[in-house]
Image (cartoon, rainbow, N blue to C red):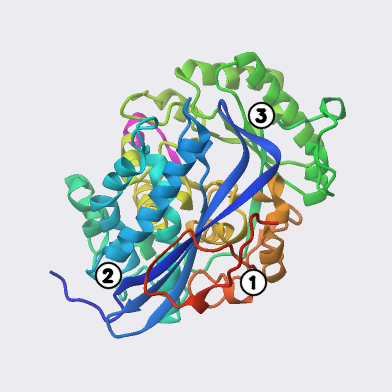
Amino acid sequence: MKRPLSSDIRVTGGAIFLLPIATRLPLKFGDQVVNEVTLARITVEVQTTDGRHGIGWGETPLNVQWGWPANLSYQRRHDAMVRAATASAQALYEITEPGHPMELGVLFRREYLDDIAHNAGDEETGPVPELAALIAASASDLAVHDAYGNALHLDTYKTYDKHHMRSDLVDLFGSELRPEDQGLFAGRWPADFLELSPSTTLSAWHLVGGLDPLEQEELQGTEPNDGYPILLADWIQQDGLQCLKIKLRGNDITWDIERLQRVGRIGLANGVKHFCADFNCMVTDPSYVHAALDSLSKSDPDIASCLLYVEQPFPYDLDANPIDVHSLSSRMKLFLDESAHDWRQISHGFELGWNGVALKTCKTQTGALLSLAWARAHKMDIMVQDLTNPMLAAIPHVRLAAHANTLAGVETNAMQFYPAASQLEAHIHPRLYERRHGKIDIGSLSGSGFGMRVEEINRLLPKPHAVFGSLRQDSWNSKTVSRVQ
């Protein structure tokens, strides 16, 4: 047993809040459509072994359709994810051995997550799938990382080093790390793979959903008249966008090729420089993607030359679908997204030929940092992708992108689908929630933890869904409200 550190923490209490938000336009993931989402916002209090206290916050959209696509009742899946989120927060409180947030997160994943996923389901749904369980657990994990920095009066990203952690990366990866990889991580820490003095400006990627109207004649007359753009060209011109992520069907080659052409032509005509093609896990044979790329190269070589990478064409269960993708990754950067549950799956994907990984804080901060370290050590490209993160959820998301030194900026689609939800946070961090000249600016994030400055954000929260342990009731403002406005 390594010596304990005076900065090691344990969770002494917490609370979970459920914040429902409606999208202004539908968002399509494969064959699933999102019209509303519940945010799980969690606050925790931690205490160090030498008696210091810190309050932290974490927040994640419980995006049922993305994390748990299935022909099951939405409400049953949603409620199971809420139960998993509540149980995850409770489990972190029940861990009595103090440690760094990375160590607590690894312990949670190893000893608690599977049981929580099994118990949170019901007779209709069965166990909560691994990806959905990670989404549910992520808000608590983020809150612990934030609270740790606040307890130490340090930026959380200054704490991922040997001065604050007992366990190096070999310890954190554990027995599943291959012997040939031991030398890559022995005596190394997450900080060794991070950009510790990142830029405060990041290129902003805009999501072009499969249901988004592109031309005036495609408008249905039911679009919101809320002052925000509807058509793609208007978004590009308003925000100065230079990066577009194009959602495709993955099972309709004609539609996908036409969509790439149409979005690409609108983009190039308005100054866009980079595109990404996202096939939403629907493809089952690499020849499908090859055909789409070949057709685009022939019909629109200028668009093809701006295609920076392809994201997750194939089903995300790599064990059930071990598709060799070397032929694709030899011609194009090919990024894991839904498949990248953790570093183990990234390792599997790397063997199959994937050469990039899209990280998400909704798979836990702990898991994202381990995945980043593994991918960087194996010279994989990195992006950080959005789960349509508004409000507090956006902050760790963009912090991860900045410190990961991504291939090209960060995805920022919450401001497309529910921009008004973040208005209160935008009073404190205006350039984070507004894209200018194709970029966001995170310079307002300052102070300890993730730099959220929650105490300055005048947001009233609903009554807690659950409270556990000893948490001061003045840790949040609460009254009965039914919806985030």
Along the viewing direction, whichever of 379 and 211 lies nearer the viewer: 211
Q: Quadrant of residue 353?
A: top left
| Residue occupying image coordinates x 83% and y 42% | 234
Precedes in sequence: disc 2 or disc 1: 2
Percent across and percent down for residue 448 are: 50, 77
Return the mark for residue 336: none
Q: Is residue 374 left or right of residue 78?
A: left
List the residue tagged with mark 3: 210
Say if the magenta span includes residue 352: yes
Q: Quadrant of residue 470?
A: bottom left
Return the mark for residue 99: 2
Precedes in sequence: disc 3 or disc 2: 2
Which of the two marks, 2 or 1, is nearer to us in this view? 1
Percent across and percent down for residue 34 are: 61, 36
Q: Amino acid at mark 1?
A: Ile
For disc 3, the neighbor class at 10 Å (few under 14, some 14 to 19, many from 20) is some
For disc 1, the neighbor class at 10 Å (few under 14, some 14 to 19, many from 20) is some
- Please say if 99 is above or below 419: below
- Please say if 168 is above or below 21: below
Q: Residue furthest left?
A: 1
Numbered range of the magenta stretch? 349-357
